[in-house]
Structures are given as C-alpha cells and as structure tokens.
C-alpha cells in the first residue's frame, strides 16, 4: 500500500499516514521516502519494523529500525567545486549509484538477521557488477499490462523520469496533477514524474518484483556554480 504525504517533511502527516497503514491495512513493515522519523517513532510504539530514509535514524526507533538509504554528497561536491575553481566546470546530468559511492545503506538494526545481511550483500554486489538490474522486464502495471517486456531494461533517461505508473502488486495511485504542478513550477517537463514524498507499507513483508522499496537508491543532481545540487530523487529497488 502506497500513501502520499505530498511533502518532504511533515511529521504530523507522516504519523497519520503510518497510523492509516497499520490500522486500516494491517501493515507490519513501514518504509518511507520522507525526511522526518515520525513514521519510525510510531512503528516503535507498535513494535513493527521500519525502514527509514536519508540517514541513520536508529536512535528514534531502536528495536524497530532495519536500515535506510543514505547519500554521500561529499565526493560529488568536491569534484564539482574543484571543476568550478579550475575553469573546467560544465553543466551536466548526474545520477549517483552504489558503484560510485554516492548511495548505500545505513547500519542495520538489531532485528536484521545474518542471513538477510548476506542476501543483501550478494544483491548489492550484483547491482554493482551489473549482473542484476532493478528495472529489468518483464514488469507489469497494476492492471496486469506489460510495461517493460522481457529482455528490456529501463534507462534513467528518459524511462525512469517519465515513469507514471505503479507495478502490479502495489495498491495506490500516482497523484499526477499534483506532481505535474510541482514539476512545472521547477521548470521541468510535466510528463516527468519523480519518485518520493511517500510512505510505503509491506503487509507480511512481501515485496513484489519492481515495487518501490526503501533500499538501493541512485540519486539525481544537477548543479552549477552558485546554485548547488537539486533535491535527490529516488529510484527504488525491490531487494
């Protein structure tokens, strides 16, 4: 089940969304793509698992915490600032990855087993060496229609940035009008639908292949002298 808060940081909305996912949908795992620990603090009171976002927030939910996607902006900042200083800077598109050290996972919580850690490590290695692709077909939308045929893998541009559908097994919808208004206000094509600003529930912990999942998170940044990088945008992995 997917619930949109339509805000990067709104603890009250995040807690309300978490309560809805647990009380109305029976969720026993919560994940998020928002910035406060409100969902995790609620998860802690209910004794259910929580996957955070952006940083190690274990202190807010010590026994519910599983892990979170984290970003290391330092090397990117350093490279771009040096380029600006020596006159070699050029406007460009950047999509960080695990391989280049931009993104990774926060430390695991106490409930994560040794076997799970080993499984994640194996999948991480496969992502880095290119033997596993998160958005490889076949992938189906909510109606069961094939959106990504077998043998095809979605690319960052234009595919992922134009992705306006949810995979089979996900309950919820993409708020296209709200997202498109935001995109237009940022000067981006309204057909692009970024991922983010949501809470995700996993009743029973079952994750359909291709489903949005807090986990491996390449991020996007566009930067220029005097106008720093834009907000990272997540692309989710099912593993």
Image (cartoon, grey):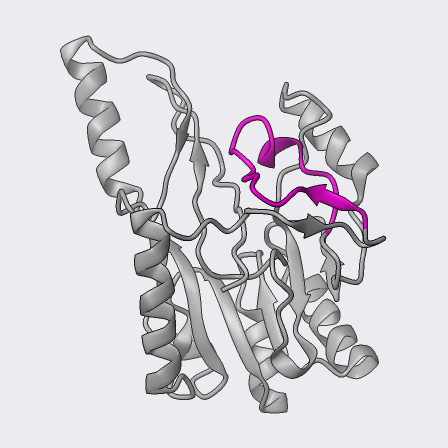
Furthest-top residue in this view: 87
- In the displayed structure, 118 sits above or below 160; it is below
- In the displayed structure, 121 sits above or below 115; it is above
170 relative to 55 in the view: left or right:
right
- In the displayed structure, 90 sits above or below 161; it is above
Q: Mostly what secondary structure, the magenta segment? A: loop
| Quadrant into which the N terminus falls | bottom right
Residue 99 place in picture, x, y as percent: 28, 46
Please tell me which residue lies in front, 204 or 10: 204
Region of the chain picked out in magenta, as a range: 145-166
* Residue at the image point whose x is 14% and y is 12% from the top: 86
Please tell me which residue lies in front, 87 or 192: 192
* Residue at the image point whose x is 57% and y is 39% from the top: 152
* Residue at the image point whose x is 46% and y is 79% from the top: 65
* Residue at the image point whose x is 35% and y is 46% from the top: 130
Q: Quadrant of residue 22 in the image?
A: bottom right
Q: Report the label total.
A: 0
- In the displayed structure, 198 sits above or below 158; it is below
Please tell me which residue lies in front, 152 or 170: 152
Residue 43 place in picture, x, y as percent: 60, 81
Furthest-left residue in this view: 86
Question: In this view of the protein, can residue 13 be seen by the observer?
Answer: yes
Q: Is residue 34 magenta?
A: no
Q: Quadrant of residue 58 in the image?
A: bottom left
Question: In this view of the protein, can residue 71 be seen by the observer?
Answer: no
Residue 164 place in picture, x, y as percent: 73, 39
């Amino acid at each position: 089940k997917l619930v949109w808060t339509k805000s990067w940081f709104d603890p009250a909305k995040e807690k309300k969304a978490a309560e809805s996912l647990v009380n109305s949908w029976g969720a026993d795992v919560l994940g998020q793509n928002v910035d406060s620990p409100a969902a995790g603090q609620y998860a802690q009171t209910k004794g259910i698992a929580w996957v955070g976002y952006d940083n190690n927030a274990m202190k807010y939910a010590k026994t519910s915490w599983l892990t979170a996607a984290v970003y290391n902006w330092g090397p990117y900042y350093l490279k771009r600032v040096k380029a600006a200083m020596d006159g070699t800077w050029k406007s460009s598109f950047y999509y960080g990855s695990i391989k280049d050290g931009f993104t990774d996972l926060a430390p695991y919580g106490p409930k994560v087993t040794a076997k799970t850690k080993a499984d994640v490590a194996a999948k991480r290695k496969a992502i880095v060496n290119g033997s596993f692709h998160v958005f490889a077909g076949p992938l189906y939308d909510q109606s069961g229609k094939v959106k990504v045929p077998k043998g095809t893998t979605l690319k960052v541009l234009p595919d992922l940035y134009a992705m306006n559908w949810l995979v089979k097994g996900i309950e919820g919808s993409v708020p296209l009008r709200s997202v498109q208004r935001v995109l237009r206000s940022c000067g981006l094509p309204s057909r692009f639908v970024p991922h983010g600003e949501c809470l995700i529930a996993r009743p029973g912990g079952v994750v359909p292949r291709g489903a949005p999942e807090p986990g491996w998170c390449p991020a996007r940044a566009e930067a220029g002298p005097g106008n720093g990088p834009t907000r990272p945008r997540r692309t989710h992995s099912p593993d």
